[in-house]
Image: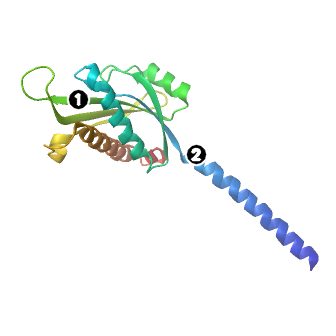
Amino acid sequence: MRKIITFTTLTAILFVGISSLKAQKNTDDKIKKVLYFNPEVDPDIEEIKEPTNTAFFSAVSDNLSERKNRMLKTETQISFDSIDKKTIADYCDNNDADFAIVPKVKYFKVGIGKYVFSNQVIVSMKLFDAEGNLLTETDYDTYRKNMRLLGSTTNSVKIGTNGAIKGILKQLRKLKPSAEAGF
């Protein structure tokens, strides 16, 4: 009887140990590392770049805290319209990232003059894999989608960023219903 209890106890301890190792391995495999570049701001005015970056990354971190993704931030800004595949692949390789997102925030011009802006923005994003291949791109217009006329510009950037991330996730699920759709 004593041998049976000892055998059962050792078997249970061994089973619990193997199960915990599998659980640790599976959680590491599911976490995706996403590299975000600083958004290109249009119009190119230095005074609005820092508040835009702050609002953008605040929205990204809030959005990714709900998912099993890890945000990597780089202070580099890449031109949204002319993206080099090798550059994206190098950044992903150096930062050990699974995906890279190149964003752009475009402010609407309202009124006469160069420095008059409204609180409306279009947030555009391009999603690349670690090899630098374009997977999908989307944009979110806060005026057309929400008909926002009032509110702060910071909130518009956050709403546009959240909408663009949801758009990317939606398009990614349509493109690849495999494991990558869990981005």
Residue 136 in sight here: no
For residue 70, side relative to residue 167 (left or right): right
Q: Residues within 10 Å of mark 1 (few under 14, many from 20)?
A: some
For residue 118, side relative to residue 132 (left or right): left
Q: Quadrant of residue 38?
A: top left
At x 43%, y 51%, the residue is 66
Residue 171 in sight here: yes
Quadrant position of the C terminus in the picture: top left
Identify which amino acid the numbered label 1 is placed on. Answer: Lys
Q: Which residue is mark 1?
A: 106
Report the residue that reaches farthest toward the right: 2
Q: Nearer the viewer, mark 2 or mark 1?
A: 1
Q: Which mark is residue 18?
A: none
Q: Which residue is mark 2?
A: 29
Would you place residue 64 above or below residue 7 in this image? above
Q: Quadrant of residue 75?
A: top left
**Closer to the camera in the image, 144 or 4:** 144
SS at circle 2: helix
- Give the CA distance from mark 2 to mark 1: 36 Å
Would you place residue 172 above or below residue 46 in this image? below
At x 73%, y 57%, the residue is 18
For residue 172, side relative to residue 98 (left or right): left
Would you place residue 106 above or below residue 46 in this image? below
Q: Earlier in the sequence, mark 2 or mark 1?
A: 2
Q: Give the color scheme: rainbow, by chain, secondary structure or one colour.
A: rainbow
Q: Residues within 10 Å of mark 2 (few under 14, many from 20)?
A: few
Identify which amino acid the numbered label 2 is placed on. Answer: Asp
SS at circle 1: strand
Residue 51, horizontal then vertical, whole percent: 31, 30
Residue 4, horizontal then vertical, whole percent: 89, 75
Residue 40, horizontal then vertical, whole percent: 31, 25
